[in-house]
Amino acid sequence: MRTTASVTTPGLAASGAPLRMLLGLLALPTGLLADDWPRWGGGADCNMVSRERGLPQSFAPGERDLQHGGILAGTTRNVRWTARMGSYAYGNPVVARGRVIVGTDVRTLTADARFNHRKGGLVKCFDEATGSLLWQLVTPERTDVPAEMHFSQQHLGTCSSAAVDGDRVYVVTSAGEVVCLDLAGQSNGNQGPFTDEAAYMAGASNAPVVLSAADADILWRYDVIRELGVSIHDAASCAALVHGDLVYATTANGVDKGHEAIRAPDAPVLIALDKRTGRLAAREREGISARLFHAQWCSPSLGVVNGRPLLFLGGGDGICYAFEAIAKVGDGVADLRKAWSYDCNPPEFRLRDGEPIRYTRGDRRKKDSPNKSDGTYLGPSEIIATPVFHGGRIYVGIGQDPAHGRGRGLFHCIDATKTGDITSTGCLWRFDGIERTMGTAAVHDGLVYVTDLAGRLYCLEADTGRCLWTHDTDAETWGGALVADGRLYVGNKKGLHVLRAGREAVPLEKIPLGAAAYSTPVAANGALFVTTLNYLWAVAAR
């Protein structure tokens, strides 16, 4: 247990206003729609907290059926159903209106003669009660982009979590498009206005595809590469956010193949589309792309501050932003107005001997990198974790692509009521005992739970940032912790850890899953949904 890291609290001292002074702010309810989990984080605030009860503390994932694939019936415990993913599943499942929707890659289609491509993304929609596959969207590998773009990780599949709004599903595909899907799939016919799903799923192979009721129904699609000149780096990853008549998404704009130059410095990193038609309605023009370290992969969140809805975005330039949200679609393309910005990289992370630290120095794969991947390297990082809005505050940490290795991180608590450049005035506290993180935090009962890449789970006081305890899960961790039913559920490279939520570290279970669980567990409608690279489990007490 480590509790020696320092916490700085300049904002608390300056304002004299601890958490109780912020409770008068209007805030969106934490992540629930009739006990569904319809988007990344459950709700617009992206706080990883569920009010579900009666969840099992443990479950047996079952034995693999080596002859036929899947899980052997009768070998599981506390499992309602299981579903096979591909070779990769990074996006979290969402649960809404009796459906479970999750992204993976196309390698599960080897038995489907309609598709002869083996790279690209897949969105699967299951029946929530039985796990039966209802429909799926196939997104073939995109080949119409220049090599300098380094859009090289499409084989990882659909890395984004979907968002369900009414009878529509919004998702960022592995091809870098924002698509709107019919929740019913093709079972109620091809709704349009997009009606060319057969050609879309065939891709460059031009193989004949005959649509069936088990295929997805695309209502519209928006291509950020073709429409905005975005240069996607590695992979597209963003959970869309629906607010009013608009759907917000980030573009995954990034550096080139050499990891040095930015090919599209004027392209936006955040856009808003008319959720009914897919028309571009607004875009960010703050010059974030020109300052990108690596790529823009953070998903937006939203909260109401002083009566106005704000979008919160962790920038690929290491700065956290708040933009004024637009609820209604206007004429033309509006500019998203910045409400405030907060630099999550203090000078010691950005400068050495008065000179800027080159971002690539922190990539352990580079021959000249001093980073030994032991967690001690100090340098700049972007924001990949989603900013969590709670009680008028933003909670967010900095980190990098896991392939770059471990390094020093920093976790921030930001006063969301400020305006302008609030790097100094908006800092309530920051915790420097954490390494690089991609994990989105969970804030509950006055405590903040956050993970880092090294596999440690930290419990901090939400009001002060004081570290109460640290638990080492002993394996690389990409996702965050889910708070549900008085417990913490955390996935890592080896399996699932379950701890008691509270001011003391009480480990309860360690469940091996046979593959890495890089996503964050989800709870909805009396069940826990756990995803590894290869399988999805619907866990429910029996």
Image (cartoon, rainbow, N blue to C red):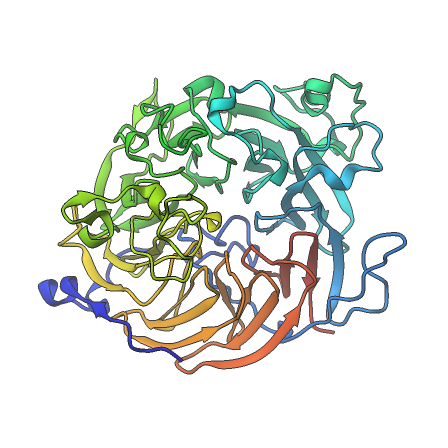
The residue under the point 57% across, 31% down is 180
Q: Is residue 143 visible?
A: yes
**Residue reaching furthest to the right:** 67
- State left or right for residue 157 relative to residue 263: right
Q: Position of residue 538 (x, y in %)?
A: 69, 60
- State left or right for residue 402 relative to residue 304: right
The residue under the point 85% across, 62% down is 72
Q: Position of residue 429 (x, y in %)?
A: 22, 64
Quadrant housing the C terminus: bottom right
Q: Residue 454 or 512: which is nearer the viewer?
A: 454
Q: Is residue 312 visible?
A: no
Residue 74's quadrant in the figure? bottom right
- State left or right for residue 24 relative to residue 516: left
The residue under the point 25% across, 48% down is 307
Quadrant housing the N terminus: bottom left
Q: Residue 237 or 96: which is nearer the viewer?
A: 237
The residue under the point 49% across, 48% down is 403
Q: Position of residue 378 (x, y in %)?
A: 29, 55
Q: Position of residue 112 (x, y in %)?
A: 83, 34
Q: Residue 115 or 308: which is nearer the viewer?
A: 115
Give above or below for 235 relative to 533.
above
Give above or below for 430 relative to 275.
below
